Image: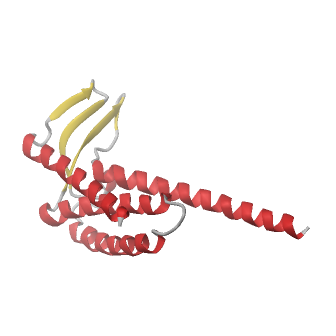
């Protein structure tokens, strides 16, 4: 149950921050947080990460529905594992996916607002949901690496026990 609460918290923080940006800022408006390096800006995205697949709203709605159902099922399946990294990671991805899903479903676009400039390069503008998805996927990769390491250590212990 706690993992669904984590997903809900991610979802609510994402939706709250998007609401603040959408209702308090005009599109294109920027607020400096750290000089020209980090800005809060009001931006809309009709595509996926980095603006790819612009205008494919129904595709994203169908895919996200399938992914969300799969994540809910998988969280339920792995929630009793002794290692808690994977279910937390899945919850973060679920919360982020649902946050962007609601935007696409209700408005046909996603509200993005974190803008980072690295010299002349501007990183694609993103939001809390995107951040949760990226951190969640990073944790899934970490969990996979740790699990592989544990399996190798267990296999090595078994080999040493046979000798």
The residue at 52%/67% (across/down) is 81
| Residue at left offset 45%, top offset 68% | 79
**Outermost residue to the top:** 35
The front one of 66 and 73 is 73
Foreground: 117 or 2?
2
The picture places residue 87, in percent across and down from the top left corner, at 44, 63
Residue at the (28%, 44%) spot, across then down = 125
Q: Position of residue 143 (x, y in %)?
A: 54, 58
Along the horizontal axis of the image, is 45 left or right of 132? left
Foreground residue among 78 and 128:
78
Q: Does 39 sit above or below residue 19?
A: above
73 to the left or right of 16:
right
Residue 56 at what x, y percent from top left?
24, 66
Q: Quadrant of residue 155?
A: bottom right
| Quarter occupied by residue 39 | top left
In the image, 27: left or right of 52? Answer: left
The image's colouring method is secondary structure
Q: Quadrant of the N terminus?
A: bottom left
| Residue 17, image x, y percentages | 19, 46
In the rendered image, the quadrant that contains the C terminus is: bottom right
Q: Quadrant of residue 142?
A: bottom right
Query: Which residue is depicted at the point 37% across and 63% down?
Result: 3
Give the number of callouts.
0
Q: Is 122 left, or right, of 107 in this rendering?
A: right
């Amino acid at each position: 149950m706690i993992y669904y609460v984590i997903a809900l918290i991610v979802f609510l923080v994402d939706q709250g921050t998007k609401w603040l940006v959408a209702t308090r800022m005009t599109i294109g408006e920027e607020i400096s947080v750290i000089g020209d390096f980090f800005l809060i800006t009001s931006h809309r995205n009709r595509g996926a990460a980095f603006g790819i697949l612009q205008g494919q709203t129904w595709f994203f709605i169908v895919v996200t529905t399938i992914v969300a159902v799969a994540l809910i099922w998988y969280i339920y399946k792995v929630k009793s594992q002794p290692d808690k990294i994977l279910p937390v990671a899945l919850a973060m991805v679920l919360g982020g996916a649902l946050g962007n899903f609601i935007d696409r479903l209700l408005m046909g676009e996603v509200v993005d607002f974190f803008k980072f400039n690295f010299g002349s390069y501007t990183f694609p503008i993103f939001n809390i949901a995107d951040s949760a998805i990226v951190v969640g996927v990073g944790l899934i990769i970490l969990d996979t690496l740790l699990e592989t390491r544990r399996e190798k250590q267990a296999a090595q212990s078994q080999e040493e026990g046979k000798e």
